Image: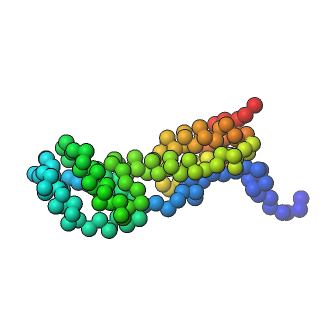
Amino acid sequence: MSGEIVNKVATSGLVTLDLEELKPQWEVVSFDIAPWLWQGLALKEKDFRTSASEFDWSQFEGKSVAVQCSADAIIPLWAWMLISSKLEPHAAHVMVGSEAELSTMLWRAFIQTLQPEDYRDKRVILKGCSKESISESIYAELTFRLQPVVKTLMFGEPCSTVPVFKRR
């Protein structure tokens, strides 16, 4: 025995995809229009437009904004459009919905930029343990995109994987 320590994972030919490391830097924040409603119940056009005009939208510079209404109110479509038009010069992305929905949308767009051919005939591990919560649908979509080209697809860590797909 030579006493040399060999990293078997590094020499195994496994490719680990760590979504947390690959993720572009985006900051997802929410904007709630509920405070702009009349008595917290209804939208008055003139008041709503005044609030939108006087608001400092620059605080959303470069951020991905999930626009929502926490009050149980009927919001006309044009109101969402107005908010989007105010955010357009500042925000990186805008979506009506929750922060989680916006994050999933951003992940989907990112996955579309990955080149599956880069993983052709490789043994790929989708790293599972991350600090950030990543939607199950993202892992499912990535599996769908990679499966036609990879030799093997696994989930987890190189020291402890769960087999997902193996080409025969």
Residue 70 visible in rendering: no
How far across and down, in percent of the image, does residue 37 sit?
15, 52
User: Which residue corresponds to the image point at 31% horizontal and 57% vertical from the top-left?
Assistant: 85
User: Which residue corresponds to the image point at 55% horizontal and 48% vertical from the top-left?
Assistant: 111
Q: Nearer the viewer, residue 153 or 68?
A: 68
Q: Nearer the viewer, residue 92 or 147?
A: 92
- Quadrant assignment for the N terminus: bottom right
How far across and down, in percent of the image, does residue 58 sit?
32, 68
User: Which residue corresponds to the image point at 40% horizontal and 46% vertical from the top-left?
Assistant: 101
Q: Is residue 152 left or right of residue 28?
A: right
- Quadrant assignment for the C terminus: top right
Q: Using the rendered view, name the quadrant where residue 140 is placed.
A: top right
Q: How many marks?
A: 0
Q: Residue furthest left?
A: 39
How far across and down, in percent of the image, does residue 21 sit?
58, 58
Q: Using the rendered view, name the quadrant where residue 30 is placed.
A: bottom left
User: Which residue corresponds to the image point at 23% horizontal and 65% vertical from the top-left?
Assistant: 55
Q: Is residue 41 left or right of residue 94?
A: left
Q: Residue furthest right?
A: 1
Q: Nearer the viewer, residue 160 or 113?
A: 113
Q: Nearer the viewer, residue 23 or 63?
A: 63
